[in-house]
Every structure is written in structure tokens, then in C-alpha cells.
Image (cartoon, rainbow, N blue to C red):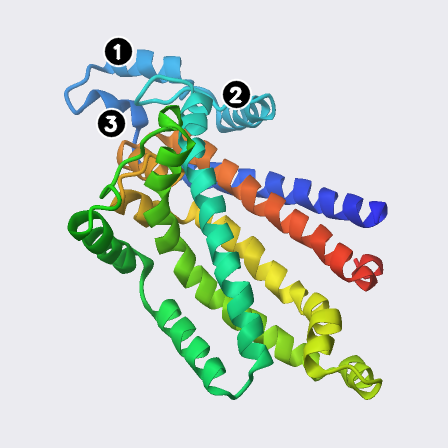
Amino acid sequence: MLRFALKRLMSLVVTLWVASLVIFLSLEVVPGDPAAFMLGLNAQEDTLAALRDELGLNKGPVERYTDWVGGMLVGDFGTSYTYRTPVSRMILDRVQVSLPLALYALTLSTLIAFPAGIWAAARRGKPTDIVVMGITQLGVAIPNFWFAMLMVLVFAINLRWFNAGGFAGWDAGFFPAMKSLTLPAIALALPQASILARVMRSSLLDTLNEDFIRTARAKGLSRRQALWRHALRNALIPVLTIIGLQFAFLLAGAIIIENVFFLPGLGRLVFQAISARDLIVVESVVMLLVFAVVLVNFLVDLAYAAVDPRLRGRR
């Protein structure tokens, strides 16, 4: 298990290095001058030169890249061109919204999808299975931003159970803060729960057709006992993959939902930084999100090995 983990860890490091190069080079070729954007069209050349020197834009690409990567390794993401505050502080403020929102949505998605997928697989071809699959198909088809606006209309404007947007802040207390994240989390969770439930059902049905399940049934186990004792654990591998991908999506791809509910999260920060051409914020936040995605995939690989020991010797 240790050798397997070390191999995956090396792969993680190489992936992060390649990702940092791609992100840096992608932003290097973007046309325009951040200093000119900040000072406007009528800025004097000496003022522009002084600002470029202050921001480190006069350095060569290699030096800027090494400074950026070296700073990130010690927690220094640089200084925002627009807000003139440390990027690490901005990220820390925003991740306090995005990370709980992603975990909240993933928890709701898993709690909905697992029972739905198992229940549908256990009743394959019956009315219950048809109803569950129909609901999940509807959940996949409905855009989450449209569903979010519908929930705002119903639960915030008509029923007044929740606020239409904004974040109460953790200083207001745990429950008021979580209440602010409830509607966004549901809007993110339901489409993901639909996908996860369908994958869970499909994986379980495939596993129930395996030879070892037939052997277990031949030894006297009922279909329900074979499902819970043997099929469920073996069916978790593709499900874990989807959960890992969903967490990465919920953390990095919630920009539309954050804008619908006016949440000060990472997605909205990236959107604002792109609009203001604050490239140091863009590359730092994107690199952080890439790290989160790669780390989740690494943990999913370890979960694979824990669920199925046969995989430890294949990689």
C-alpha cells in the first residue's frame, strides 16, 4: 500500500508542475498590459514604467515563473494588481465560502444518490425503478442555474424561508451561515445526485451479474443479502470516481451559482479578477483549484486500493 501511495504521490507532483507551466504560459500569451489597464488610457509612460516595476512585470518570464511557484510553496501567492492586498488573504476569505458550499452540496448529493441508486437497482424493472430513473433523468436535464432561480422565487421571495442571496458570514454563527448556503447547495447537489444515482444503479446491476454473485446466490444468499454483503463494496469503484470529479466540479465550477446567490466565493473571485485583468489572482486561484482537483483524485486512488486490494499491484 505504501509503494502504491508513493507512486501516486509522484504522479501528483508531476501533474502539478505541468499544470503550473500551462497556467503561467497561457496567461503570458494573453494580449494587453495589466499596468495600462489599471491606470487607464491616459497614463504617462513613466507612471506605467514605475507600476510595472512595482508589480514585477519588468522581470523576465522565467524569473516571474520561479518567483510565483517559489512563493506558492511557502504560502505567498503574490499581491493583487487591483486590490493591492495579498492574494493569499483574498483566497482565504473566499475559500471559507466555496469549500463549505462544495462539501455541503457533495454531502447532500451523496445522501440522496446512494439510497436512490441502491433502491432502484434492488427493484430493477419495477415501477419504483422507473420512477427513480425518470426523476434522475429530469435532474440531469434541468440546468442548475435555472433551478437555483426557481428556488429563489419559491423559497426566498414567496415563502420567505431563506434570503435571496448573500452570505451571513461565520461571525454570525454556524447555523445562519449554513442557512445562507442551503439553497445554493441544493441547487448544486440535485443535478449531481441524479448523475451519481444513475452511476450507482448501473454499477450495482453490473456487479450483480458477476460470477461471484451467482456463486453467493447458489450458496443460499438472497438477492438482497448478496447486494449488501458483496455487490455494494465492489460497485463503489466507479462511484468513487464520480464523487471525486463532483467535488472538483463543485469547488471549481460553482461560479454561476455563486453569482446567482451573490456569494463571495472562489468562482466569483476568478470572474472578477478576469474582468479586472488581475492576472496574478487568476493564475493563483486556478492553480489552487487544480491542486484541489489533483489532490481529490489522489485520495480517490487511495480509496480504490482500500476498496479493492487487487488494484494495489496494478499501478
Q: Earlier in the sequence, mark 2 or mark 3?
A: 3
Where's residue 119, x and y in %? 55, 74
Q: Secondary structure at mark 1?
A: helix
The amino acid marked with disc number 1 is Asp
Q: Is residue 149 above or below residue 77?
A: below
Say if 160 sits above or below 128 in the image: above
Residue pictured at 78% horizontal, 46% vertical: 5
The percent position of residue 181, horizontal first and vertical second, equals: 36, 42
Q: Residue at x 67, y 48 (%)?
A: 298
Residue underneath mark 1: 46
How packed mark 3 is, by other alpha carbons closer than 10 Å (few <14, some 14-19, many 20 or more), is some
Identify which amino acid the numbered label 3 is placed on.
Phe
Mark-to-mark CA distance, 3 and 1: 15 Å
Residue labelled with disc 2: 76
Quadrant (top left, top right, bottom left, bottom right) of the C terminus: bottom right
Asked whether 162 or 139 is in front, the reply is 162
| Any part of residue 25 in sight | no
> Dot 2: few (<14), some (14–19), or many (≥20) neighbours within 10 Å?
some
Three-letter amino acid code at the position of disc 2: Asp
Image coordinates for residue 187, horizontal then vertical, percent: 35, 54
Q: Residue at x 60, y 21 (%)?
A: 74
Residue 202 lies in quadrant: bottom right
Labels 3 and 1: the sequence-earlier one: 3
Q: Position of residue 289 (x, y in %)?
A: 50, 41
Binning the other alpha carbons within 10 Å of mark 1 as few (below 14), some (14 to 19) or many (20 upward) gives: few
Instruction: Tell me the mark number nearer the camera, choosing from 3 and 1.
Output: 3
**Mark 2 to mark 1: distance in Å?**
29 Å
Q: Is residue 215 left or right of residue 56?
A: right
Location of mark 3 (residue): 37
Helix, strand or loop at label 2? It is loop
